[in-house]
Image: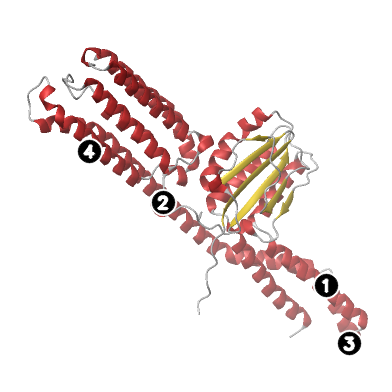
Amino acid sequence: MTPTKATSSSGSAAAAAAAAAAQQNHTPVPTPHTKPHAFTQQRLDPLGALAVWTIVPGIALVVFGYAVVTTVLQADEIRHPFLAVLALAAAAVASAALVSAVRPSRSPVRQTSLLLIVSLGLAAHLLDQAGRWGSNSLVQDDFGPIALGFLLVALAPFRPWRELALAAVLASVVVAAVTLPQEPFRSVRVPSGVFVVVAVTQVLALGLAAAAYSRRIVRQLLAWQTDARRAIARRTEESRGSVVRQVVEQQLASLQPGVFPLFDGVLERGEVTKADINRANELAAGVRRAIVAHIDETWLDAVIARERTALLERGKDPLLVVADPEHRAAHFGTQQRAATSALISMLCLAPGFDPRSLVVQADTEPDSEPDTQVDPPSDRQQRHSGIDTFSIRVALDLPPRRVRALLRSYTAVLRVVFPWVRVSIRRPGLTLEFGDKRPRPVPPVR
């Protein structure tokens, strides 16, 4: 085998290995912290849920407005005005809790929020029934069952369908238990079961519709994601050969100016000199450095390189730094990568951005407490050795209020795809910290 052929063969093998390793670094993995039974539209499609939340304040207003109107129209049936006022207060608090729970700044919606909202809705219904006890002539004009149903409908994009269905069933049981004893007070004489069916249907119809929507949209999103992953896998497999060829060509192009002249000189002289050996060592070291640098590159490096190029095209002098020596970014899931990439792109395009200030760093220890916190960490979010944490530091010469406005939709998505997010503002400095549990290493197969 001639030296040229040997070099080409070894260069091809090294380039193929580099291409495979780099491709593995860029291949996203599913977001690990969401269990399948907890899938919701908000977790699978954060942007879609962000668009849906704008109708929630309208639903909350309808719930409270309907409670007020029905109470006023049926004032002659109220025996205990104080309890009726408390019922309206509970309905108002339930509506306010709904709006507060689904706000983008508090995403994702927790199970405790569902329990609180449904409990307040049931409390409003029980207080309303207690205020009318003994004079409630009809059941279909009570606001409680309808209000409970609408509250569950508003939560459909944010909680799993099993929780919504269970909440609807439990609420129906409570409504039935309160409706049945009031049969002697009704103005219409029908079997007592009819009143129960009328009251329960209002809750079950809306509640189960909410559960059906949640179940259907989650299945569609999962099916779409599965199809997308399969298409990506097929395209990756199809393009693997061309990627390897491109890398091989690049490596051979880099070898041609130095290696080939060295071999030509050795062939002409018919002997290997000490200078040839030293030159060969230098060239080999350069090839190793190039291959290692290519293997070490992650998707985050590619994002930073893209933004650096865009800033250069705009006439800026960027200094964008990535400090991730342990390649923790490779553990990010698909949604986490997309959210982080979109955030970095937005920061680089934001007004007042200092192109020499962006630093993305893998970190484990918090900095000093900031002057202003958009989302201070709770006890549940305290860091430990099993969490990979990242910080993005950048200088934005903008008022804190405007910075919050810029970040609102981005941090809403970050809070869905990462277990915890912390934002600190100290003009002109902005620090975003987020983290996720480190995936457990897969034991080797023996």
Q: Are marks 2 and 3 in contact (CB under 8 Å)?
A: no
| Rendering quarter of residue 143 | top left
Q: Is residue 150 left or right of residue 334?
A: left
Label 2 and label 1: CA atoms lie apart by 50 Å
Q: Residue at x 15, y 32 (%)?
A: 180
Residue 335 location (% of width, % of height): 53, 49
Q: Earlier in the sequence, mark 2 or mark 1?
A: 2
Q: Secondary structure at mark 3?
A: loop
What percent of the width, then of the height, locates residue 439? Answer: 54, 61
**Residue 20 in view here:** yes
Q: Is residue 35 above or below residue 109?
A: below
- Foreground mark, 3 or 1, reads 1
Indicate the quadrant where residue 312 lies.
top right
Frontmost of labels 1 and 4 is 4
Mark 2 to mark 3: distance in Å?
66 Å
Q: Going from the N terminus, do you reach mark 1 or mark 4 first?
A: 4
The mark closer to the camera, 2 or 1, is 2
Do the numbered discs 4 and 3 sit on residues whose CB atoms are within 8 Å? no
Alpha carbon distance from label 1 to label 4: 79 Å
Q: What distance separates the C-alpha of mark 4 from that of mark 2?
A: 33 Å
**Element on which disc 1 rests:** helix
Q: Secondary structure at mark 4?
A: helix
Kind of residue at disc 4: Val
Query: Of the residues shown, which amino acid type is indicated by label 3?
Result: Gly
Q: Which residue is mark 4?
A: 173
Q: Which residue is mark 1?
A: 283
